[in-house]
Image (cartoon, grey):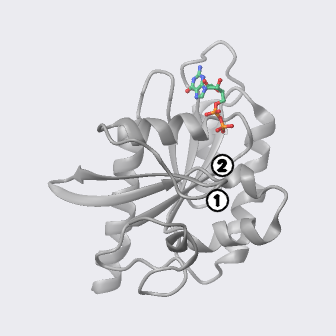
């Protein structure tokens, strides 16, 4: 898996579709400063492969992880902010993912208020698709400056019909679980589809 063409051309089952043998494309969305790069780098570093740059402005981390005794290949894209000034790139980003992590910082209400908008944008781009979306409240280690409680985060996730996970990239807390959750979400949908 290499070359930027992969980031544009999607796999077997249509745009952003999940090919049975395909690599799961995980897109990180969220405001600047919430910890997207930190989480992507932790993912990349779970084993010792180095991040590879796909293009001038893209960064992706690819690796295989073992979840419930079965291997899965994931590529995590940390490219969202670079799409800010380019609506074509942004739309491409919204089309190509198999799983979306919408990240905010639990210490930053502004980043939290952006979540609904991002989710709406995503669902508008991919109507009629049961997309796996995980809402991620990062920086859970910063207890004293927390502005969003666990309950509030969960509440919004329920309202928006997505999963909720709190992580601390600083402490590597719940980060492995986050990416394992990504794989489980995909497998769940696959087993429903194949039924
Ligand atoms: P991005 O703009 O969303 O990619 O955010 P970054 O990954 O660049 O993180 C922004 C800042 O927040 C950096 O200084 C990180 O070290 C810090 N940061 C990221 N995640 C955490 C976390 O879980 N806890 C704490 N305390 N700081 C974090």
What label does residue 156 carry, if any? 2
Q: Nearer the viewer, residue 23 or 113?
A: 23
Disc ID at residue 191: none
Q: Is 135 situated above or below 37?
A: below
User: Image height check: is 129 above or below 168?
Assistant: below
* Mark 1 burial class by Cα count in 10 Å: few <14, some 14-19, many 20+: some
Q: Residues within 10 Å of mark 2 (few under 14, many from 20)?
A: some
State the residue at coordinates (50%, 42%). 40
Q: Is residue 44 left or right of residue 117?
A: left
Q: Residue at x 50, y 72 (%)?
A: 6
Residue 188 relative to residue 14: left or right: left
Q: Are marks 1 and 2 in contact (CB under 8 Å)?
A: yes
* x, y percent for residue 15: 55, 82
Please determine whether, in this image, residue 140 is positioned above or below residue 77: above
Residue under the image location 24 percent in, 52 percent down: 67
Q: Quadrant of ligand 1?
A: top right
The image's mark for residue 160 is 1
Q: Residue 140 appears in which quarter of the rendering?
A: top right
List x then y, in percent, for residue 170. 51, 22
Question: Could you give the CA–CA distance between mark 1 and mark 2, rounded to whole angstroms?
Answer: 6 Å
């Amino acid at each position: 898996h290499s070359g930027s063409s992969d980031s544009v051309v999607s796999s077997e089952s249509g745009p952003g579709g999940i090919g049975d043998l395909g690599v799961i494309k995980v897109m990180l969305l969220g405001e600047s400063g919430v910890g997207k790069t930190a989480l992507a780098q932790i993912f990349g570093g779970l084993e010792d492969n180095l991040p590879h740059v796909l293009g001038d402005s893209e960064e992706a981390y690819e690796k295989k992880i073992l979840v419930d005794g079965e291997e899965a290949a994931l590529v995590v894209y940390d490219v969202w902010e670079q799409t800010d000034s380019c609506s074509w790139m942004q739309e491409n980003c919204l089309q190509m993912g198999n799983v979306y992590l919408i990240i905010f910082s639990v210490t930053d209400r502004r980043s939290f208020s952006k979540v609904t908008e991002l989710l709406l944008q995503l669902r508008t781009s991919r109507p009629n698709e049961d997309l796996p979306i995980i809402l991620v409240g990062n920086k859970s280690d910063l207890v004293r400056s927390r502005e969003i409680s666990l309950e509030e985060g969960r509440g919004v996730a329920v309202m928006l019909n997505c999963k909720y996970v709190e992580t601390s990239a600083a402490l590597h807390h719940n980060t492995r679980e986050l990416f394992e959750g990504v794989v489980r979400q995909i497998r769940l949908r696959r087993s429903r589809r194949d039924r």
